[in-house]
Image (cartoon, rainbow, N blue to C red):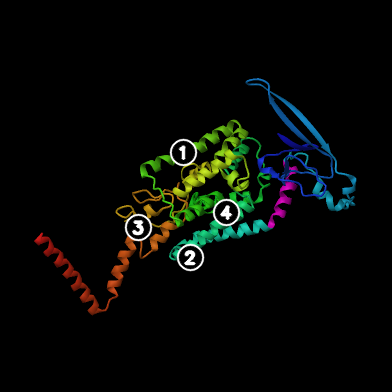
Amino acid sequence: RIQLIQGDNSVRFRDKNYKRLRKVAAEGAPDFTEVALFTIPDTIPFDPAEPWRIELLVGRATGPTDKAFLTFDLSYRLPAKYLKRVQPAPASETAWRTAPDANAGAAPAVSGVWKRLWKQKTGQLVVLMVALTILTAIFFFQDWLARRPRLTEAVRIGFLTFTLFGIGFYANAQLSVVNVMTFFNSLITNFHWEYFLLEPLIFTIWVAVAASLMFWGRGAFCGWLCPFGALQELLNRVAKAIRIPQVTVPWGLHERVWAFKYMLFLALFGVSLYSLSLAEQLAEVEPFKTAIILKFAREWPYVLFAVLLLAAGLFIERFYCRYLCPLGAALAIPGKFRLFEWLKRYKQCGSPCQRCAVDCMVQAIHPEGQINPNECLYCLHCQVLYHDAHRCPVVIQRRLRQERRDLPPLARISERIRRSGRSAGQRRTEKVE
């Protein structure tokens, strides 16, 4: 364990704060056997002009179950030649910023930090708000969009690409079940909004997801805003393009394996009530940190786990989302009580028609025809089929009837004669047999 300490503040470096370097490119730099770059999170109030120290805790096994620990400290002060004294601003300009509220506890100390972070990420927040507005428009005008299959496909691929590279790889705004556990833990301990505001993008997405649960269930996030989900779907599209065979899980098995993600979430939630730190470690069942936050720059067991899940998704679309995602389970529970049902169905859906059920990418449509809101990712594929005059059997029949009505009188008579002749020929064939 290695941590940085300055005054009353300390930061323990974790794997996401660590980046291994091959060498230091500066002229005259010493040649070390191992070089690494540790980054201090924006949320930590660190002043490089003040003294600080590094603390390294080393453990050594002294028996089958015993360990001995030794701490090494290294103090540092920035040389004076790198410092420049700046005249402080007049008291009238700074008093309002620095006057603490003695009765507010630790929260006010964080207040200035989160406000500064929101200002720093104004550009990213604007882009995110534009994306959320576009997604809201997609859902509100889904009927208009679903009547245009090519446009729907282009919009979905484009938005998933933005989610993966913009929200995920660039902004690292991947939501996690850890956020859910932390929120509930804070409710029963000492709740302060300020601590959640320290991550502007994640906070904004959570607000949007909470609102979307009333309208579309888990589908808005899981289907459109989850970077790891976008990665799975885009990889599966590539797999289909190169003709990797797709596996259809039998409905009976599929319906039962659904329960795994709910059991994982309940187990993690129960552990978090006992020890939040332990629950955070167990939450590594989510590959989000490895694949999205750290971009696979991690120890090989974590990378192997994430790669195996992505490999499974090449054969079973959205494999992790279907069966293992505890965050999806956490969102599905309140999403079950959504107020609106905007996905349209025909009375023939499920009996006898199974076209949408067969084509649903996560098999969220029951054989009886109803859509399971707990599993639906709101990809709108079934709505495209709903309006498709060449693939939906119900719409095909309507189109054919309309085409016959639009025929000129003579053509209509010849069509009837042709159909009656075909029927008579079939009857004669049956008699001969």
Q: CA distance from mark 4 to mark 1?
A: 25 Å
Sequence order check, earlier mark of 4 and 1: 4
Label 4 sits on what residue type?
Leu
257 over 161 or under it: above or below: above
Question: What's the residue at 50%, 60% (across, down)?
Answer: 140
Q: Are marks 1 and 3 in contact (CB under 8 Å)?
A: no
Q: Which mark is residue 346?
A: 3
Would you name the residue on which mark 2 appears?
151
Q: Mark 1 against mark 3, which lies toward the viewer?
A: 1
Label 3 sits on what residue type?
Tyr
Sequence order check, earlier mark of 3 and 2: 2
Q: CA distance from mark 2 to mark 4?
A: 20 Å
Q: Are marks 3 and 2 in contact (CB under 8 Å)?
A: no
Which residue of the protein is positioned furthest toward the left in this rendering? Answer: 432
Q: Is residue 5 magenta?
A: no
Q: Position of residue 427 (x, y in %)?
A: 13, 63
Quadrant where the C terminus sits is: bottom left
Q: Which residues are magenta?
A: 107-122
Helix, strand or loop at mark 4: helix
Sequence order check, earlier mark of 4 and 3: 4
Sequence order check, earlier mark of 2 and 4: 2
Badge 3, how many Cα within 10 Å: few under 14, some, many 20+? few
Left/right placement of residue 99 relative to residue 115 reads right
Question: What's the residue at 52%, 54% (across, down)?
Answer: 224
Would you name the residue on which mark 4 appears?
164
Q: Is residue 118 magenta?
A: yes
Main secondary structure found in the magenta portion: helix
Would you name the residue on which mark 1 appears?
260
Q: CA distance from mark 3 to mark 2?
A: 23 Å
Q: Are marks 2 and 4 in contact (CB under 8 Å)?
A: no
Label 1 sits on what residue type?
Phe
